[in-house]
Amino acid sequence: MAVDEQPRKLRADAARNRERVLEAAREVFAEHGVEAPIDDVARRAGVGVGTVYRHFPAKENLFEAILVDGISRMASSAREAAEADDPGRAFFDFLELLAQSGGENMALVDALDESGYDIKHASLSHKQDLEAAFAQLLRRAQEAGAVRRDVTLSDVLTLCGSTCRAAGAGDGGRERSRRLVAIVADGLRVYAP
């Protein structure tokens, strides 16, 4: 079953276990890379390996669920930021948030690509939701005079994706990603004369 499909309603304990597995998987993969065994995820989540496989029959399903969950959370954050009183600051704070998760997400995307798994189709509606929310945030920041008016959403997404990929995951990846996104932010920012 693809992540976008409506799953049957889980019992409360099963839903809690699923969330624990997702959180543990994010932590394990961030610490040890996507090659970390599922046994490590189960141990960290405090569940049996069978519980992990019941929710995620293959490692690729777990990667996809982490990505989709992350994209959904980012979309929610972008929507909240678009409503902020200071849209310029909210925009640049959101860029930093993207940098924090970017390298890890790129590692998951790369792992899925290498396995031949089609993440593009599975996460399309979630990606569209994020892009719509981010477009609103960018538009408000531009209207407030904080971001250059000649910048498009596509420009910002390409710059952020490229900097996160260039920074990579692993040792120092998050810090490199933050530095590179700070450089991008300086190029997007409108400075008073």
Image (spheres, grey):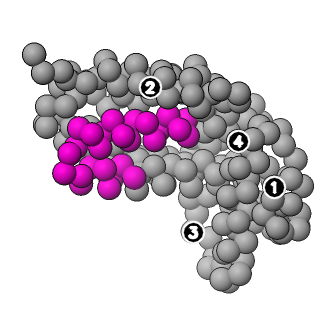
Alpha carbon separation for disc pair 1 and 2: 30 Å
Tag 3 secondary structure:
loop
In the rendered structure, which disc, 1 or 2, sits on the residue that comes first in sequence? Answer: 1
Tag 1 secondary structure:
helix
Frontmost residue, 127 versus 88: 88
Residue type of the residue flagged with mark 1: Val
- Residue 30 in the image: x percent, y percent? 70, 42
Residue positioned 55% across, 40% down in the render: 101
Q: Are marks 1 and 4 in contact (CB under 8 Å)?
A: no
List the residue tagged with mark 2: 181
List the residue tagged with mark 1: 41
Q: Are marks 1 and 3 in contact (CB under 8 Å)?
A: no
List the residue tagged with mark 4: 30
Alpha carbon separation for disc pair 1 and 4: 11 Å
Residue type of the residue flagged with mark 4: Ala
In the rendered structure, which disc, 1 or 3, sits on the residue that comes first in sequence? Answer: 3
Alpha carbon separation for disc pair 3 and 2: 35 Å
What is the crowding at mark 3: few (fewer than 14 residues within 10 Å), some, or many (at least 20)?
Answer: few
State which quadrant residue 87 falls in: top left
- Residue 79 in the image: x percent, y percent? 32, 53
Residue 169 can be seen, yes or no: yes
> What is the magenta range?
77-102
Tag 2 secondary structure:
helix
